[in-house]
Image (cartoon, grey):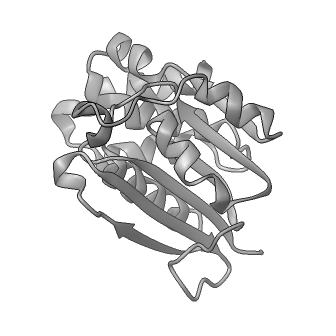
Amino acid sequence: MKTKNIMIVGVGGQGSVLASKLLGHLLTSQGYDVKVSEVHGMSQRGGSVVTYVRYGDKVYSPVIDKGQADFIVSFELLEAARWLEYLAPNGQIVTSTQQVDPMPVLIGAMSYPEGLLAKIQALGVKVDALDCLKLAEEAGSTKAVNLVLLGRLSHYFTDIPPEAWQEAIASCVPEKFLDINTRAFTLGKNA
């Protein structure tokens, strides 16, 4: 199998590390060679975070180059736009419509770009956008946006059985948060 590439992008503290760990666990359980690499930047200060997940028969490098991402999973619209040049032709963006103001916006030096989703779609990019924050709240926690996004991403992985996703969630999520995260995943999948 040709190596497939998934980028998970967001802002520090949104749960992208758990999402990448869960994806790595899932894909390994399906017999793939998997490489996961995390780049944190100023993540502890709300800065950009990107995680690479690569899988296939044999993966030699954990890094995804520009134009190679089959999927970009984005926790926030501006991060989806920031990493757009990494999307492969015919690649798919799965994004939350949530907007998190970066530091230049917070200090008043810039304003958040208006109409960002429409601008991305106008480029002919395949975008699956949903209000993941609302669905996470419905599941019981605003911190479950990551599982809502993974639930939506699972919609594109028809060859991986639902029980494999459930096993990966159970293995990677602390038991006390399992019900909320399972609900969040299901809401994302069925959105």
Q: Where is residue 99 in the image (x, y as percent from the top left)?
A: 41, 27
Name the outermost residue toward the front: 109
Name the outermost residue toward the bottom: 60
Q: Residue at x 26, y 20 (%)?
A: 141
- Between 184 and 119, which is closer to the camera in this rendering? 119
- Between 126 and 105, which is closer to the camera in this rendering? 105
- Figure check: 42 above or below 94: below
Q: Position of residue 20 (x, y in %)?
A: 41, 56
Image quadrant where one finds the C terminus: top right
Left or right placement of residue 24 versus residue 108 in this view: right
- Figure check: 4 above or below 146: below
- Between 36 and 75, which is closer to the camera in this rendering? 75
Left or right placement of residue 128 versus residue 165 in this view: right
Q: Which residue is drawn at 37% across and 10% down?
A: 138
Q: Position of residue 107 (x, y in %)?
A: 21, 34
- Figure check: 172 above or below 64: above
- Between 104 and 93, which is closer to the camera in this rendering? 104
Left or right placement of residue 51 versus residue 103 in this view: right
Image quadrant where one finds the N terminus: bottom right
Look at the image and tell me whether residue 14 can be seen.
no
Q: Which residue is drawn at 73% across and 43% down?
A: 158
Q: Position of residue 161 (x, y in %)?
A: 63, 44
Look at the image and tell me whether residue 54 can be seen.
yes
**Number of callouts:** 0
